[in-house]
Each structure stands twice: as structure tokens, then as C-alpha cells.
Amino acid sequence: MALGVGGRPDPDALAAFMRAAARRYSGGDPAHPRIRYWQIWNEPNITPYLSPQFRGKRPVAAAYYRAMLNGAARAIHEVRADNVVVAGALSPFTADYGSVESVGPLRFMRDLLCLSSGPKPRPTCSTRVEFDVWAHHPYTSGGPTHHAAHADDVSLGDLGEMRALLDAARRAGRIRAPRGIGFWVTEFSWDSKSADPRGVPEVLRARWVSEALHEMWKAGVTVATWFKLRDEPFPSTPYQSGLYARGATPAQDRPRPSLAAFRFPFVAYLGSKGVLVWGRTPGGKQARIVIEQKSIGGGWRRVALLRTDRYGIVQGRLALPRSTKRDVIRARVAGGNIAALPFSLQPQPDRVYNPFGT
């Protein structure tokens, strides 16, 4: 359950509401489902979700969000200690246009967690922050390794910096999290060109989905949520990022290749020491994975058999000396017909695309 609809709520009133909601959905009453995961607010670093962001030129939203978050987290954990409080869910970009203002996510984090800037952050206040998971929305105006233009912004290519700041806060004792701190991506997407003329071509988008999930995994992200299962109408809305192409009714929606990439991401990169492969099985199930290779003019041939870890992650570096950039690699679950999309060894240059197309 996520809360965050704008304005500037009273922290005490929010805590009281969260306590009541957590009790109602604690699992003790069969009439109500058990809710364990509670996200406190959405994109609190941007108006209109939380305002004001500034007083004059001084950012103030992070300090206010700290009071909101600590009160809500304490109330939720008092009801059940195994409840999970998700914090952040930040907008990725610094903005200052018209009625919209935002604080860059890294600056917002430093203010929230009371850490100084620089390569070795140090505490700047004594107040700790209580949560179990940090979340972010790393929308990206390019491919999965693309860096945001502003130093305090965080797109997919900058997730490592956010992870490093989170780790620095943990080491400095700035976070109260008895079970450790998770790192989630609770929104990411690109519009598809099949629905938005300025979106990403679908073949490239499917590749980017797999590469994005790999980049997230490298940064320690354990949950990734795609924004929009199906397109919204074009051009009346800006969201044509569906994993399903919109039909007249949901029953007539058509799955896009990006859906297959999201369910079974797989990448393969040719380097001087062989071919690096990485993937995750649908549902994260343990399995044996057959790696197959196809060259120009040839058919698929088996080149390796790998085992996933208990989370369904398969990875390895394969010595394939005759491989060229024109070859294609794919992964298949052994003993069945579940396969990832083929992945070309030809590197793709970064290209600039607004994640929301138009």
C-alpha cells in the first residue's frame, strides 16, 4: 500500500492514520487482507506531491518528510514488527518550471538522512530515520547505462551512486532498520514507439528492459516494478509504456516483446575474456539454464549449461573463442520451451529518448 497524494500532511495525523490502517490490515481479522508492505508517500521531492519544496532558496521538504516518515514507520512497526516500511520513491530529476519544483534525489537523500556532500559523507544532525526499504523511480532519457545530466539526479546509470549513499548512511548509523535496508525500483519505463511516435522502437525497448534489470541487479536492487501494464490512450495522456499494447478492451490487449524481456531478462556481452551472460528465470525459480548461440547463416547450438542461484539468477562468463558481434545468444530453461528473447552481441549505442515520449 502506498500513500502520497500531495500537500503537506500533519505528521501526527499521518501517524495516527497509519496506526489505524496497519491494525485494520494486520491479519487478525479474516474480513480484511493482511498488508505487510507500506510505502510512505510518493515522490516527496517534487511538487505537487509534497509542498513546499523550498523556502526561498533553502530546501525544506526533506526535513518535513523525515517527520512524516518517522511517525508513520514507528506506528506501523508498533502494530507488527514484521511490517515493511518503504521510503523515498523519489522523482529522478531536478525541476524548476512553473508550478513544479523538485529537489534532486541525492540532495534530498542527504538532507533527509542528515549527511554532508562529498566522497565521505558525515552526519550533520542527530536524528535517525526509520524505514526498511529505500525506493526510487530512475526514469532515464536514454538507455539503461545513461547518466542523468544533473549531479544530484539519479537515472538508471546512476543507481550505484544512490546505493553508495544509502550504504554510507547505514554505516554512519543514520537509519533505524533492524532487518537491514532493501533497495527497490518502484517505477521505471519507456514509452513504446508502436503507440507513441516519439517512443522507443519495440525491439530496442525489449533489449533495454533486460539491460535495465541487469543494471539494477548490479546496484543491489531486489524489486523492480514497471510503470503501466497497458498503454493509456494516445495522445490524450503521456503514458504509452504498457507491456501490453492497448486494445479496445483489456481482453484484446496484445503482449509486447518487452513483456517477455521483463519476465525473463537475459543479456550477453562480448568481451576480451569471453561472453558475459546474466539472466533471471520467470518467477525467480531455480533451474538449469541452457545457453545457445546462433551465428550468421547457422542454427542454434548449445554452448553451456548453467545453474541458477536460489533467486533464479543465472550468470557466468563463457569462453566462446569464435564469437563475433554478429552472433546472437539466448537462454532457455532446460527440459522445456521457456526461453528468453535472443540477445545480439552487437553493442547498441546510447540514444536519447524522453521516457514518456512526447
Image (cartoon, rainbow, N blue to C red):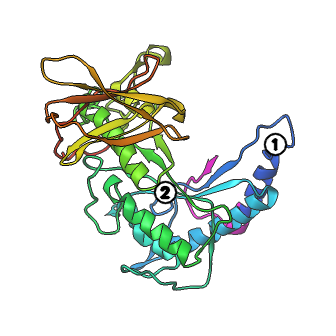
Q: Is residue 154 above or below residue 34?
A: below
Residue visible at 50% across and 37% down? 312
- Whole-percent x, y for residue 279 in the image: 40, 37
Q: Which residue is mark 1?
A: 27
Q: Quadrant of the C terminus?
A: top left
Which quadrant of the structure image shows residue 150?
Answer: bottom left
Q: Which residue is mark 2?
A: 43
**Is residue 351 in sight in this rendering?**
yes
| 188 relative to 205 in the view: left or right | right
Residue visible at 43% across and 52% down? 137
CA separation in Å, label 2 and label 1: 28 Å
Question: In the image, what residue type sits under mark 1?
Answer: Gly
Which quadrant of the structure image shows residue 100?
Answer: bottom left
- Whole-percent x, y for residue 140 in the image: 31, 50
- Whole-percent x, y for residue 58 in the image: 43, 80
Question: Which is closer to the viewer, label 2 or label 1?
Answer: 1
Crowding near pointer 1: few (<14 within 10 Å), some, many (20+)? some
Residue visible at 75% across and 60% down? 77
Q: Regarding mark 2 in the picture, which secondary structure is present there?
A: loop
Q: Nearer the viewer, residue 165 or 57?
A: 165
Crowding near pointer 2: few (<14 within 10 Å), some, many (20+)? many
Question: In the image, what residue type sits under mark 2?
Answer: Glu
Q: Is residue 127 above or below residue 146?
A: below
**Is residue 209 in sight in this rendering?**
no
- What range is drawn magenta here? 1-14
